Image (tube, helix red, strand yellow):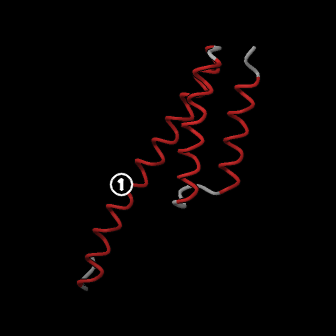
Amino acid sequence: MPNIKSAKKRVKTDAVKKDRNREKVAAMRTAIKNVKLAAKNGDKKLAEEQLSLANKKIDKAVKHGLIKKNKAARDKSKLNKAINSIK
């Protein structure tokens, strides 16, 4: 436990940031799962709607430094590939 006043404040703000970041990452992962589920069920229209939402969440995660650019590109590519495989 820190003794200095500013260090104590830092512990509190870090905890708040950690919670916010976890929420953003969880929302991103849920959006990705929704796209995969729609693609698996063969619903192309729903999958494309979910894809736009997932892309938005992925881009925001990159912007906030939660994931790296290459992971975002890889995730987007996989989701597009899954949707394009629907007949």
Measured along the vertical axis of the image, is residue 82 above or below residue 54? above
In the figure, is residue 33 to the left or right of 15? Answer: right
Question: What residue is at 57 percent from the left and 21 percent from the top?
Answer: 46
Give the quadrant of the N terminus: bottom left
Residue 68 figure quarter: bottom right
Measured along the vertical axis of the image, is residue 59 above or below residue 1? above
Residue 44 figure quarter: top right
Amino acid type indicated by mark 1: Asp
In the figure, is residue 74 to the left or right of 17? Answer: right
In the figure, is residue 83 to the left or right of 65? Answer: right
Q: Where residue 74 sits: x, y (%)?
A: 71, 45
Q: Where residue 47 sits: x, y (%)?
A: 61, 24
Instruction: Count numbered badges in the picture.
Output: 1
Name the foreground residue: 67 vs 83.
83
Question: What residue is at 54 percent from the left and 37 percent from the top?
Answer: 53
Q: Mark 1 highlights which residue?
A: 19
Question: What residue is at 39 percent from the left and 59 percent from the top?
Answer: 18
Q: Where residue 22 sits: x, y (%)?
A: 42, 50
Provide the secondary structure element on which disc 1 rests. Answer: helix
Disc 1 packing (10 Å; few <14; some 14–19; many ≥20): few
Give the quadrant of the C terminus: top right
Measured along the vertical axis of the image, is residue 74 above or below residue 47? below
Question: What residue is at 52 percent from the left and 39 percent from the top?
Answer: 29
Residue 8 figure quarter: bottom left
Q: Where residue 72 sits: x, y (%)?
A: 65, 49
